[in-house]
Image: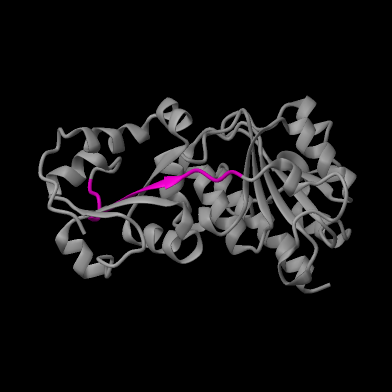
């Protein structure tokens, strides 16, 4: 543990704060990690990715982070406020190395793709032009919870290392492989070549219970989720095997993208476990 960092305008502090900007993240290959839970997940699952940890003395004692396996600095509340992207940080900020998974590893040209969890058929979420960081992070978290094998963010989607995305994953970013930069057409082609059924969540589609009853969720499934406002284009929908909608039985006008994605991913998980 180093001496206490007290100057909010110090070069080291400005460098950490700059990671909230996409161009700085792209240049450095680093990203900002905030909060004790996310840092604990990184320490447990991917400690080799941690580069620096900054923590207030109070937070270090509260969350038992004073012996973390990474270069650690005590900082004042003012310094932590200057580093963090949140308005009310929880006393813990870390710098991590980015670690995107190649789409070739998610959908290799030969073989069965990433090894599915529990020996069950694979589930992959593909995000096409998903721009809201909270939605993207929540879908990554839901994919992890549902036992999905990977999440693919096309080049038209938000940067998964955006601080708001990272916070929304609540540590799931370190559990499930995330691929970036691929086109939707390429991701779908690779998935279909490995025997995945390609389903698109879209309001124009068939009701999800009917699709499950038809057996379309029984095997490896790649779910495509589109833009929050515009959904998927007709060209996008032409790439998939079937469009599927989550029926609304109450009076809600619509359903949040991340909520609908969670339902779809869990329906695949349920189908795999009750075959």
Which residue is at 24% across, 33% downward? 14
Residue 85 to residue 272: above or below: above
Q: Quadrant of the N terminus?
A: bottom left
Which residue is at 55% across, 46% downward? 99
Q: Is residue 251 visible?
A: no
Which residue is at 85% across, 60% downward? 219
Nearest the viewer among 265 and 45 is 45
Nearest the viewer among 160 and 233 is 160
Q: Quadrant of the C terminus?
A: bottom right
Q: Is residue 18 left or right of residue 163?
A: left
Q: Does the magenta portion include 232?
A: no
Q: Position of residue 15 (x, y in %)?
A: 29, 34
Q: How is the image coloured?
A: one colour
Q: Position of residue 123 (x, y in %)?
A: 73, 56
Residue 188 to residue 46: above or below: above
Q: Position of residue 189 (x, y in %)?
A: 84, 37
Q: Does the magenta portion include 95?
A: yes
Q: Position of residue 263 (x, y in %)?
A: 64, 57
Q: How many marks?
A: 0
- Tell me the quarter of the picture where residue 267 sits: bottom right
Which residue is at 87% across, 54% downward? 111
Q: Is residue 83 visible?
A: yes
Q: Point out the stretch of residues depicted in magenta.
A: 88-100
Q: Is residue 213 left or right of residue 244?
A: right
């Amino acid at each position: 543990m180093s001496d206490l960092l007290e100057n909010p305008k110090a070069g080291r502090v400005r460098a950490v704060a700059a990671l909230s900007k996409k161009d700085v993240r792209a240049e450095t290959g680093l990203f900002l990690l905030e909060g004790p839970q996310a840092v604990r997940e990184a320490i447990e699952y991917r400690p080799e990715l941690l580069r620096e940890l900054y923590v207030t003395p109070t937070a270090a004692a509260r969350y038992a982070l004073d012996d973390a396996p990474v270069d650690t600095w005590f900082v004042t509340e003012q310094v932590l406020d200057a580093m963090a992207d949140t308005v009310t940080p929880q006393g813990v900020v870390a710098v991590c190395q980015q670690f995107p998974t190649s789409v070739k590893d998610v959908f290799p040209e030969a073989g069965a793709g990433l090894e599915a969890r529990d020996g069950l058929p694979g589930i992959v979420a593909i995000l096409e032009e998903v721009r809201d960081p909270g939605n993207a992070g929540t879908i990554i978290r839901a994919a992890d919870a549902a036992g999905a094998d990977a999440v693919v963010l096309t080049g038209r989607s938000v940067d998964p290392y955006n601080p708001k995305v990272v916070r929304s994953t609540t540590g799931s970013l370190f559990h499930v492989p995330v691929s970036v930069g691929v086109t939707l057409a390429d991701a779908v082609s690779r998935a279909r070549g490995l025997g995945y059924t390609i389903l698109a969540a879209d309001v124009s589609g068939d009701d999800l219970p009917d699709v499950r009853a038809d057996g379309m969720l029984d095997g490896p499934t790649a779910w495509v989720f589109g833009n929050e406002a515009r959904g998927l284009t007709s060209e996008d929908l032409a790439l998939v095997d079937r469009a599927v909608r989550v029926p609304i039985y109450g009076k809600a006008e619509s359903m949040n993208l991340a909520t609908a994605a969670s339902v779809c991913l869990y329906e695949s998980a349920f189908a795999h476990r009750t075959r």
